[in-house]
Image (cartoon, rainbow, N blue to C red):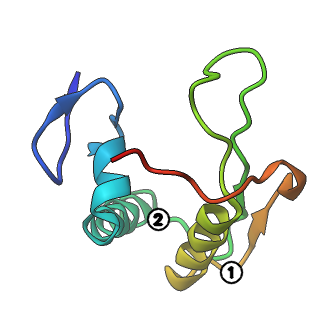
């Protein structure tokens, strides 16, 4: 299990490349976005990626496994696309829009 870089908790639902837990994405989106922007900037600099490199976002839609996870919401996808464009990427694309769902319902 990886440790979340925002809250410090260990959880199996942590993206190892970002060290960001799913809970923090939902509970502290501003902190999560800041961490993502920092990791993104470092990786772009390290790999010397030009802003014109194609960047495609795809909806998650479980068909066979992971039925307990929701499909990507339209709002989430649009915010991710706006963040990519805000980071300076010029060739962005949001694919399979027909799979996007309703806003997430967060359990309290």
Rate crowding at label 1 as few (under 14), some (14 to 19) or many (20 or more) other CA atoms within 10 Å. Answer: some
Residue at mark 2: 48
Rate crowding at label 2 as few (under 14), some (14 to 19) or many (20 or more) other CA atoms within 10 Å. Answer: few
From the image, which quarter does the N terminus lie in?
A: top left
Q: How many labels were placed on the picture?
A: 2
Q: Residue at x 30, y 57 (%)?
A: 27
1 vs 93, nearest the viewer: 1
Q: Residue at x 36, y 69 (%)?
A: 37
Q: The residue tagged with tag 2: helix, strand or loop?
A: loop
Q: Tell me if residue 18 can be seen.
A: no
83 vs 103, nearest the viewer: 103
Q: Position of residue 100 (x, y in %)?
A: 77, 53
Q: Is residue 64 left or right of residue 2?
A: right
Please report contact status of discs 1 and 2: CB closer than 8 Å, yes or no.
no
Residue at mark 1: 90
Q: The residue tagged with tag 1: helix, strand or loop?
A: loop
Q: Quadrant of residue 107?
A: top left
Q: Residue at x 59, y 63 (%)?
A: 76
Q: Tell me if residue 38 can be seen.
A: yes
Q: Position of residue 104 (x, y in %)?
A: 56, 53
Residue that extends furthest to the right in the rendered view of this protein: 98
Q: Residue at x 73, y 64 (%)?
A: 54
As measured in the structure, the alpha-carbon distance from the residue carrying label 1 to the one carrying label 2 is 15 Å
Q: Say above or below: 79 vs 12.
A: below
């Amino acid at each position: 299990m990886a440790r979340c870089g925002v809250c410090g908790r260990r959880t199996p639902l942590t993206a190892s490349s970002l060290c960001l837990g799913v809970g923090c994405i939902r509970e502290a989106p501003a902190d999560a976005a800041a961490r993502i922007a920092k990791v993104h900037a470092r990786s772009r600099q390290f790999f010397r990626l030009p802003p014109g490199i194609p960047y495609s976002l795809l909806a998650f839609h479980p068909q066979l496994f992971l039925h307990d996870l929701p499909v990507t919401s339209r709002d989430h996808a649009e915010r991710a696309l706006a963040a990519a464009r805000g980071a300076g990427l010029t060739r962005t694309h949001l694919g399979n829009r027909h799979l996007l769902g309703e806003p997430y319902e967060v359990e309290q």
